[in-house]
Each structure stands twice: as C-alpha cells, then as structure tokens.
C-alpha cells in the first residue's frame, strides 16, 4: 500500500518592533487566540499627548529661574510629568481592546525606576562627551532630567508587559534633542546659557516635547 503524501503546512510569521507578533497558520491556532495572548499596544493618534507643560518649564528655566536653577526645574518636572501621565498620555494608550487605567502604585514605583534609570543615563551622557569628573554633580542632575522626561514612556513599558519596542522612539527623541543641543556649547559667544549643562537640558526638553507630540503619528 503506497504511503500517503504528507500535507504541507504553511506558516507565516511577522515580527513587529513592539513585540506584538502576528502569526497566521493553517492549524487550529487562530489569529484571535494569538491576539488574546499577545494584545497589541499603541498610542491613539490624538493631539492630547502634546506635553505643553514642557514648553512652560523651558520658559521658566530660561526666563524666570535664577541662574538657570536646574534643581528647581526638576522639582517642577516630576509632579507635572505625573499629572501629564494621568490625564493625557495614559488615557491615550491602548493595550488590547481597552484604554489603560492609571495604576497609582505602579506610577509611584516608576518614579523610583526613573531615579534608578538616571545612573545608566549618566554613563551614556559621559560616553557622548560629558566631563568625566568635572561638573559630575551637574551631569547627574542632567541625567535625572532625562530620566524623568522619559517617565511616561517608562511607566508604559511597565504597564504594557515590557513591550519596549513601541516606546523606544520616545527615549530616542529625548536623547537626540539633548545631543543636538550640544553644538552651541563650544561656540565662542560667551553667553551664560552656554555653560554645561544648560543647553543640553533645554535640548532634552525640546526633544521630549517633539517625541510625545508626534510619537503616536510615526
């Protein structure tokens, strides 16, 4: 008796950057079952995610604060980022088929996480050319600003089961903004605002503003 030919089973796998993988198979596992196990996550395309408070903080830092007080700026940034997360960014985040409710406990834990994140950030800043020993305290203060600018995206990483890919563009926008702003530091304009790390603080805020404003559209 001749052997029965084996049926070919076609498989198609597509990997997306935010780890929301779509799989199509000619077996019993359907797409709906896979989506139930790996729900998609995205930010709604809405202008509600524009962080207007970052522009106000830049105005305060450059026009109103005494001697570019970066510590006072940070003390304003942290609560405003929490309010932004609560009323704007998190309400625009979709995980699966529902909007995410703010987890207060997780949001407080993320504040601690942002503080811890500042330590690898300071290493990154030094690798990008910051002074290794001189102005180390100011460099760490800059790293704290960068870490807390990333706070809404960092919370979303935790709250969306570490689907990091979607949120990378927000981190990248902050880093690129700070990196581009360094161009004014070596210029011989002899302006007060050229001192380290004032331009990088402003550039990081502008990068975060752009990233959170258009992140849902790219």
Image: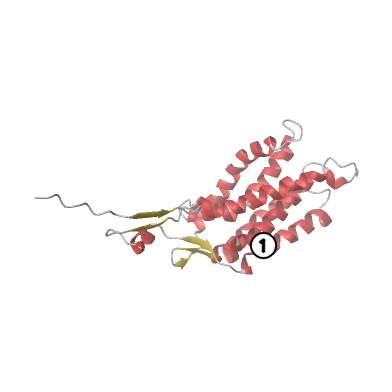
Q: Position of residue 125 (x, y in %)?
A: 68, 39
Q: Is residue 122 left or right of residue 105?
A: right
Report which quarter residue 64 is drawn in.
Answer: bottom right
Q: How many marks?
A: 1
Instruction: Please identify the residue farthest to the front as the structure is shown.
Output: 2
Q: Position of residue 201 (x, y in %)?
A: 74, 48
Please rate how many residues cluster around mark 1, counting C-alpha atoms within 10 Å: few if below 14, some from 14 to 19, many from 20. Answer: many
- Could you tell me which secondary element the residue under label 1 belongs to? loop
- In the rendered image, which residue does mark 1 sit on? 51
Up-down: is 97 above or below 82?
Answer: below
Task: Say which residue appears at 74% left-offset and 40% top-offset.
Answer: 138
Instruction: Please identify the residue farthest to the top as the structure is shown.
Output: 133
Report which quarter residue 194 is drawn in.
Answer: top right
Q: Position of residue 69 (x, y in %)?
A: 78, 48
Task: Say which residue appears at 60% left-offset and 45% top-offset.
Answer: 115
For the residue pair 218 and 59, the one nearer the viewer reads as: 218
Q: Is residue 102 left or right of residue 67?
A: left
For the residue pair 135 and 150, the one nearer the viewer reads as: 150
For the residue pair 101 and 3, the one nearer the viewer reads as: 3
Q: Is residue 185 left or right of residue 152?
A: right
């Amino acid at each position: 008796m001749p052997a029965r030919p084996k049926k070919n089973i076609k498989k198609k796998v597509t990997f997306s950057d935010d780890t929301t993988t779509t799989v199509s198979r000619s077996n019993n596992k359907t797409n709906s079952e896979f989506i139930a196990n790996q729900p998609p996550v995205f930010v709604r395309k809405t202008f509600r995610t524009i962080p207007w408070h970052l522009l106000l903080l830049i105005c305060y830092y450059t026009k109103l604060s005494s001697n570019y007080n970066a510590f006072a700026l940070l003390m304003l940034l942290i609560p405003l980022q929490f309010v932004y997360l609560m009323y704007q960014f998190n309400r625009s985040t979709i995980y699966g088929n529902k909007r995410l409710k703010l987890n207060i406990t997780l949001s407080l834990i993320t504040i601690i996480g942002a503080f811890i994140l500042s330590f690898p950030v300071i290493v990154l800043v030094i690798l990008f050319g910051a002074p290794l020993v001189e102005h180390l305290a100011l460099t760490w203060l800059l790293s704290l600003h960068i870490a807390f600018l990333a706070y809404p995206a960092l919370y979303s990483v935790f709250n969306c089961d570490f689907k990091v890919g979607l949120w990378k563009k927000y981190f990248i926008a902050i880093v690129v903004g700070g990196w581009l702003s360094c161009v004014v530091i070596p210029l011989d304009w002899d302006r007060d605002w050229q001192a380290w790390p004032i331009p990088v603080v402003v550039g990081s805020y502008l990068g975060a503003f752009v990233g959170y404003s258009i992140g849902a559209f790219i």
